Amino acid sequence: MVKADYVLQIKGLKTYFYTEIGIVKAVDDVSLAVRESEILSLVGESGCGKSQLAFSVLRLTPFPGRTVGGEILFDGEDLLKKSEKEIRAIRGRKIAMVFQDPMSSLNPVFNIGFQVGEGVKLHEKLDDQRTDERILELLKKVGIPDPAKRKKDYPHQFSGGMRQRVMISIALSCNPQLLIADEPTTNLDVTVQAQVLELMKKLREEFKSSILLITHDFGVAAEFSDRVAVMYAGKIVESSDVRTIFKSPEHPYTHALLQSIPRPDVRTSYIKSIPGNVPRLINPPPGCRFHPRCEYAKSICAEVEPKLINIGTAREHYVACHLKS
Amino acid sequence: MYEYAFSPRSIWRRFKANRLALVGLIIASVILVMGLLGPIVVPYNPYAMDFGRLLSPNSQNLLGTDDLGRDVFSRLVLGARISLLVGLGGSAIATSIGVVLGAFAGYFRGWIDEILMRITDVMLVIPSFFLIILIVSSLRMRSSLIIMGILGILIWPRLARVVRSEILSLRERDFTKAAKAIGASDLRIIFRHLLPNAAGSILVTTTMYAAVCILEQSTLSFLGLGDPTEISWGSMLMLGRNYLTTAWWLALFPGVMIFLTVLAFNMIGDGLRDALDPRLRGVK
Amino acid sequence: MSFEVLEVNLMESILEVRDLKKHFPIKAGLLSKQVAAVKATDGVSFTIKTGETLGLVGESGCGKTTTSLTLLNLLDPTSGEVYFGGRNIFKMSRKERQKLRREMQIVFQDPFSSLNPRMTCYELIEEPLVINHHLKKSQRKERVLQTMKKVGLLPEDIYKYPHEFSGGQRQRLGIARALIVEPKFLVADEPVSSIDVSVRAQILNLIKDLRKEFNLTILLVSHDLCVVRYICDRVAVMYLGKLVELATTEELFNNPRHPYTNALLSAVPIPDPEARHKRIILSGEPPTPINPPPGCRFHPRCEYAKPICAEVEPTLTNIGTVNEHYVACHLERK
């Protein structure tokens, strides 16, 4: 079902890492879609493969990983079938990415102005004067005070929150259709996180880009997104609009996870913990990957992998669970 | 996410998988056996001048005989002893001094560190090679033990530097704070916590030291500065020099032995380094 | 610097911190002269009651970790006093301080880096007993296994190395190591920040159970307010080296009086799309602790700042009626 208003459609994506100790199925048959101008949060714990999913979209999977199956449809075309040259034209321009740690993603030896302008120069081929104007405009938009002076400064002269704003300005410099933000506020203080998320919201209004937000923080997902997809051990286990996910989660993992997070707004006397540990992707449990920790597991759960199917009536609500099919 | 595996079993497993390292270990083991069992294993008395002079390798004398009619093979086996003694002994001395001084300097900083740095600065600048020759040639008694001691005392600065820099970074790690928190004394922290984590660099340098000492000792005896009463590869080489064109076996075999031994230790060192600090390429 | 003495019966409070300061000197020039200092902890005073869990919250640079390390004497203080059980720990002899280590322990944030990668699980947990040597080897083994059971580790794991455990298990190891000497006081520095979200609840519940069993007094240092609300009895908020508010958990969360606390609480995202709360977005970023602003350190970012806030530093005063509620803010003074 290819709807005209999907910006990104991932179908059956498989990205595996071929390491000395075995095959790590980081992204294992994942299907996702991001609509125009919407914010989709991809929520999952560390090691579930969500960052690798993001890298796969832009074909930035590091060695020894390879995308070995599936389709990534963007603008009607499969990104996996494009040449390296074609992908480069898309990176930074049509699809932009903001990384988790701005210190390591910004080049320490070039000043901010240079780095912000790089994308502009590359993709739009503007002359120096116009590039400079654009740089100042962008820096102002993301809230960097005194941009004319600060564009000559280097990354280490900025605080974490400022650096992240710079990263966002680089990402938005060419007006991309899709912004992939990989844990953009995880390393920031909570008050700075609030600032940066507000900024991203505001910019989304203005630029009308779609955002694929990757995070492990359910709070961020709740306040920030339109739809949520939950990922566990390399697979999508549930996805729906944000209200449904939080108010009526169907997958045992989502449900258990939401119950196990202490809330800041109410006093919780007891939170129910999930037994066991997050599985290593090198040897995931057979059948449903969550079954060893699931209190509702049946024998079929240990044998057959559940498929992601839509159980929603009025709205889409995808769940991968034997109990619900 | 990288994985570090430090159990002795996994270290050995990785070492074994490295073919060069394994070869090095085999060669070194053979030489060690030669050295240990030497007198028992040799076919003939290495000092006995029983055979015809300058005989080329034959069925009786596998590697030929020298200008005094002594069996080369027997002498070669016995020569291993000196090389190993000076090599391993010198390395042990240098390692002991270097590790302790380097660790103290890196951990306590302050004036201990300053003094050590200055000393190592000076010692590293002076070419050890010439210094050794100078010292040894001015000695009246030239026993291998003394040479071993001198070598050990001259070469420790490099290891001290290495250990110091490792300790400097290790002492900032959380597990050091944790050890302090449970009440560990400074000495305990250094020897029980920090040094084992620096084992990789230390072992690599130790094996390198062994190779260096063996080479130095051979060079000294080649120049006639070694212990005259002992049989060593270097002195055999010295004798063989005069017969390069006529009796090539006199120089070739000791030369090959020196080469192989040094190579073996180097390969072991590299293998140990890789086995102790592996970066298994994997994704969590 | 004057402060209102927190009048608590010494027997009721196990730890008392008085005007604690820890400055890190910045040296420059040929002779490495001190030109400035990072005033990480700059005059902090509070008491921890026996048996309570006090949360110390704040963002990066506020000095909470420095404070906790200094009060354990893992860092030397620049000035100030810390009284444990009535005795000033900085004035103790080496021997006495050694004994103190048995009473005050710490669990670190990152279980991976706080465990020596070359030691087995057994050696790591046993070590505190070895150092405080008063048990025979067989008795030690028994204690180790006992403690492992209490934290939920299996006996067959004793010879495993840290990297062979999962994150949650490593943290259990760290907790076992801290608790094996049966301390009275435990500092938990961000105990679940480095742990997978689905495992956090296990560790938090474990801490809750163990504190009851071991009768622990805990100082929980965290930037995660959700964790603090779940575990702590009282909460202290730090900003740029100073305490700005201190109250019981419910009082603080329901009725924050300091503008910074207000902003901090409102910034925490709530995992409920229908929760509407007014977000207070602070302007600017916290200044560095090298040159804190004069007067109240928060005044440049405070929307209620008055002229006095830029001149005089507010003192931590009790404005609570039923319960204690300390705030350091000029607005609160009537």
Image (cartoon, coloured by chain):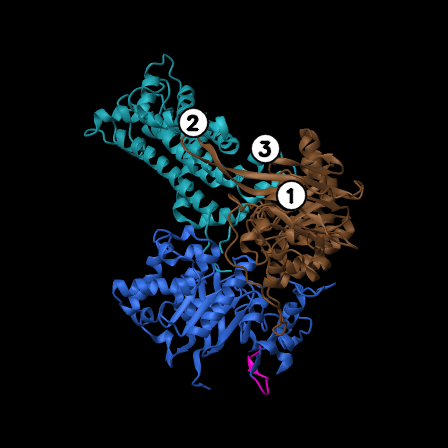
How many marks the image carries: the answer is 3
The answer to whether mark 1 and mark 2 are in CB contact below 8 A is: no
Please tell me which residue lies in front, A317 or C306.
C306
Q: CA distance from mark 1 to mark 2?
A: 56 Å
Please tell me which residue lies in front, B215 or C169.
C169
Magenta-drawn stretch contains A308: yes
Question: Toward which corner of the image does residue A263 lie, by quadrant?
Answer: bottom right
Going by the numbered disc 1, the residue's amino acid type is Val
Element at badge 1?
strand
Q: Is residue A25 visible?
A: no
Q: Earlier in the sequence, mark 3 or mark 2?
A: 2
Residue A68: percent from the left, percent from the top?
A: 42, 71
Residue pointed to by mark 2: B90
Q: Is residue B260 visible?
A: yes
Q: Is residue A300 left or right of residue B46?
A: right
Going by the numbered disc 2, the residue's amino acid type is Gly
Residue A305: percent from the left, percent from the top?
A: 57, 76
Q: CA distance from mark 3 to mark 1?
A: 29 Å
Question: Looking at the image, which residue is at 25% across and 26% down?
Answer: B240
Residue pointed to by mark 3: B186
Task: Supply the letter of whichever chain is brown.
Answer: C
Q: Residues within 10 Å of mark 3 (few under 14, many from 20)?
A: some
Residue pointed to by mark 1: C44
Question: Looking at the image, which residue is at 55% across and 79% down?
Answer: A308
Q: Residues within 10 Å of mark 1 (few under 14, many from 20)?
A: many
Task: Supply the letter of whichever chain is cyan.
Answer: B
The answer to whether mark 3 and mark 2 are in CB contact below 8 A is: no
Task: Supply the letter of whichever chain is blue.
Answer: A
- Image mark 2: chain: B
